[in-house]
């Protein structure tokens, strides 16, 4: 494996595993040595329809043989189509803006909140409350929105106006006359696959509505059927004011969306993105939405979700000394282990046996398989994980 170029020419911002994949098929990946893996990570919840999906490939190839990009100075019809599908599948009355990543989507959300706070009477409001252990992205503002102080070293000064609540219960006491929005993940992905309590989220939504404060849900990881419903917001039965999407929507093609019920918040020139919503990403997203809507409507998604959960529960129950807790929703799952050291050992042993899994937070083993994973691959993955755990 050639790491020389990385050592010499790539900034070392990632702790990479000594592994390089050359091809895949649905939930299987093959590395440069020809070894095959079961993929329980899906490129961090990105490859929602699996690797080398024939329908997605065809949709992308058909589109790029015509036109890839023209800019947003013109009407890109598949962009209108994609926005319509996202809004209709969400069930909310909203409009979309397209960008290229989760962080960019969240920047859009923050700009919506700030403009809302500017134009919505006196006093001007600007404060945005987020949660500790949240993750909202790596740009300067999304990083500041991220409630993990350790990630704020070196990069200041940051934009003002972000306040961190220890947990959802603490949010109410932090609201003041300058609060314009609350931004949360319904299941904290990077923070440890921790779902928020449904009743508390619903109570928060009602409170914020009564005080004219925007509820912004970061669904960059939870969105696009990851929790079993189109959006985790649907599962929680809330009506957010702003929602952001990214990871699973393009099936691997970069994309981000911010959608809001403040339909008139932006005027021409208020926001933009050169690549956002171009023919390439829209062809991909429209096909991903088609594939996953069919998977959901046929009942297959719900079936595979239960199958995965059952297999994971059985695996965890077989090793009570190792796995302390099973957390998560849908195909976004975690197993808590004692410490970071144990976590690293399990991930390495899994890799040796041919299973790709992720970590989240300090001590959570994280599972984010493609939504199209088969029962055979789930069985094979857990059979390999049994061997991995036995080897510890
Ligand atoms: C991954 C993630 C982001 C950041 O997305 P990028 O595409 O890496 O910018 C933001 N929020 C959540 C909840 C995420 O999981």
Image: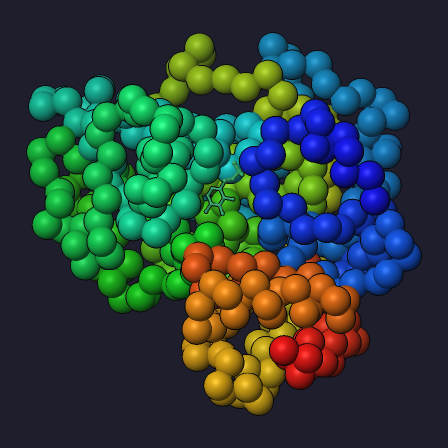
Rendered location of residue 308, percent (x, y):
63, 75
Taking the spot 59% from the left edge, 41% from the top edge, the residue there is 14
Rendered location of residue 149, percent (x, y):
30, 42
The figure's colour scheme reads rainbow
Taking the spot 60% from the left edge, 10% from the top edge, the residue there is 73
- Front residue of 96/180: it is 180
Rendered location of residue 334, percent (x, y):
50, 68
Vertical order, 228 against 104 (above or below):
below
Answer left or right for 365 relative to 185.
right
- Front residue of 115/354: it is 354
Give the residue furthest to the right: 34
Quadrant placement of the N terminus: top right
Taking the spot 57% from the left edge, 51% from the top edge, the residue there is 224
Vertical order, 140 against 129 (above or below):
above
The quarter of the displayed image where residue 116 is located = top left
Answer left or right for 85 relative to 261.
right
Vertical order, 15 against 4 (above or below):
below
Answer left or right for 228 relative to 369.
left
Answer left or right for 61 relative to 271.
right
Quadrant placement of the C terminus: bottom right
- Front residue of 239/353: it is 353
Residue 164 visible in the shown view: yes
Rendered location of residue 130, percent (x, y):
28, 44
Vertical order, 365 against 64 (above or below):
below
Taking the spot 9% from the left edge, 38% from the top edge, the residue there is 176
């Amino acid at each position: 494996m050639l790491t020389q170029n990385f050592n010499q020419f790539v900034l070392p911002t990632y702790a990479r595993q000594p592994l390089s994949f050359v091809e895949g098929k649905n939930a299987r990946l093959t590395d440069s040595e020809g070894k095959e893996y079961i993929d329980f990570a899906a490129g961090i919840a990105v490859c929602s329809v699996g690797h080398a999906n024939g329908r997605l490939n065809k949709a992308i190839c058909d589109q790029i043989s015509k036109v890839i990009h023209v800019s947003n100075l013109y009407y890109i019809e598949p962009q209108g189509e994609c926005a319509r599908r996202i809004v209709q599948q969400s069930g909310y009355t909203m409009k979309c803006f397209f960008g290229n990543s989760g962080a960019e989507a969240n920047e859009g959300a923050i700009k919506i909140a700030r403009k809302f706070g500017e134009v919505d009477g006196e006093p001007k409001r600007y404060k945005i409350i987020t949660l500790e252990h949240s993750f909202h992205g790596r740009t300067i503002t999304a990083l500041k929105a991220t409630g993990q102080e350790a990630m704020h070293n070196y990069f200041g000064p940051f934009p003002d106006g972000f306040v961190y609540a220890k947990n959802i219960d603490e949010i109410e006491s932090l609201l003041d006359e300058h609060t314009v929005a609350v931004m949360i993940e319904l299941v904290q992905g990077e923070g440890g696959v921790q779902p928020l309590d449904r009743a508390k989220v619903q109570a928060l939504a009602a409170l914020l509505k009564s005080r004219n404060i925007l509820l912004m849900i970061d669904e960059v990881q939870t969105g696009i059927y990851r929790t079993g419903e189109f959006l985790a917001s649907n599962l929680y039965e809330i009506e957010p004011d702003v929602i952001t999407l990214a990871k699973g929507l393009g099936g691997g093609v970069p994309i981000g969306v911010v959608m809001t019920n403040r339909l008139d918040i932006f005027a021409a020139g208020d926001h933009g993105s050169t690549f956002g919503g171009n023919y390439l990403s829209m062809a991909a997203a429209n096909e991903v939405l088609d594939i996953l809507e069919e998977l959901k409507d046929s009942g297959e998604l719900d079936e595979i979700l239960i199958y995965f959960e059952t297999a994971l529960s059985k695996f965890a129950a077989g090793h009570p000394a190792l796995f302390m807790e099973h957390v998560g929703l849908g195909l976004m799952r975690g197993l808590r282990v004692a410490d970071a050291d144990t976590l690293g050992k399990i991930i390495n042993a899994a890799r040796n046996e041919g299973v790709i899994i992720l970590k989240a937070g300090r001590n959570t083993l994280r599972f984010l398989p493609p939504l199209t994973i088969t029962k055979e691959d789930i069985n094979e993955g857990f059979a390999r994980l049994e061997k991995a755990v036995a080897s510890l």
